[in-house]
Amino acid sequence: MTTTLPTDGPMRAAIDAAKQRVAALHAELPRWNLVAWTAGNVSERVPGVDGSDDVLVIKPSGVSYDELDAAAMVVCDLDGRLLEGDHSPSSDTAAHAYVYRHMPEVNGVVHTHSTYATAWAARGEEIPCVLTMMGDEFGGPIPVGPFAIIGDDSIGRGIVETLTGHRSTAVLMQNHGPFTIGKSAKAAVKTAVLLEEVAKTVHVSRQLGEPLPIDQKHIDSLYDRYQNVYGQKG
Ligand SMILES: [Zn+2]
């Protein structure tokens, strides 16, 4: 079955708005030094309107960051098939699509090879929760996902299996790099930025000695406060 996207109406408006957001969020990846050349990608789920299927908006493959405006974004179904766009979708689209199919609460996915997070991934070592900001944001250590080769569902499956039932919204795919998830693409980009920050800080701390662990009860209360109390009430 081929899905045809509407040319007007609420679903078209939602897709076009998502293209604007996802294009603008891609500019954050080089801005925060998370990517080299054309590596890295951001996607967002567009929930189906009036019973139509959800779709996702993602970066095209191999296009330079300077050219990533809203018109360059591509739309795929949740099996990763191209529905709209002048370029082929990012080579990581299958992994993003797998996450959206299996984690209905996730509306944004980001992938980078940011240096420090990827250095932990290369060692296959989780980042221990030794900073209060890690307790706040991730609720514990940043877990490592399995080694997986691009080309089938194995990256997506590794992300979902590692993060399901885990507080962390970031996973370090072994020998590869981080994937982050969020309630929106913006939230997943924020997590990618903060992940790189904590990966760097814990690495630097390690050079000086062994970082001090934080008691689980303190991690729990940091996480609870930050997730439920902190911030502006809408
Ligand atoms: Zn990658």
Image: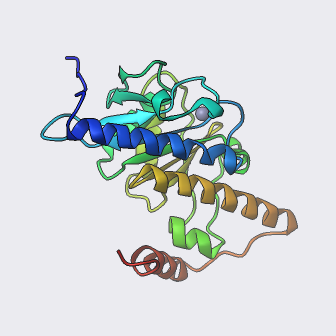
- How far across and down, in percent of the image, does residue 208 sit? 86, 68
User: What residue is at 33 percent from the left and 27 percent from the top?
Assistant: 79
Residue 175 visible in image:
yes
Residue 54 visible in image:
no
Quadrant for the N terminus, please. Answer: top left
Q: Hey, which residue is sitting farthest right in the picture?
A: 208
User: What residue is at 39 percent from the left and 42 percent from the top?
Assistant: 18
Position above or below: 129 against 69: below
Q: Along the horizontal axis of the image, is 17 left or right of 7?
A: right
Q: Along the horizontal axis of the image, is 84 left or right of 30?
A: left
- How far across and down, in percent of the image, does residue 105 sit? 31, 53
Q: Quadrant of residue 50?
A: top left
Q: Hey, which residue is sitting farthest left in the picture?
A: 50
Q: Hey, which residue is sitting farthest front in the picture?
A: 8
Position above or below: 50 against 82: below
| Residue 64 vs residue 17, the one in the foreground | 17
User: What residue is at 36 percent from the left and 27 percent from the top?
Assistant: 76
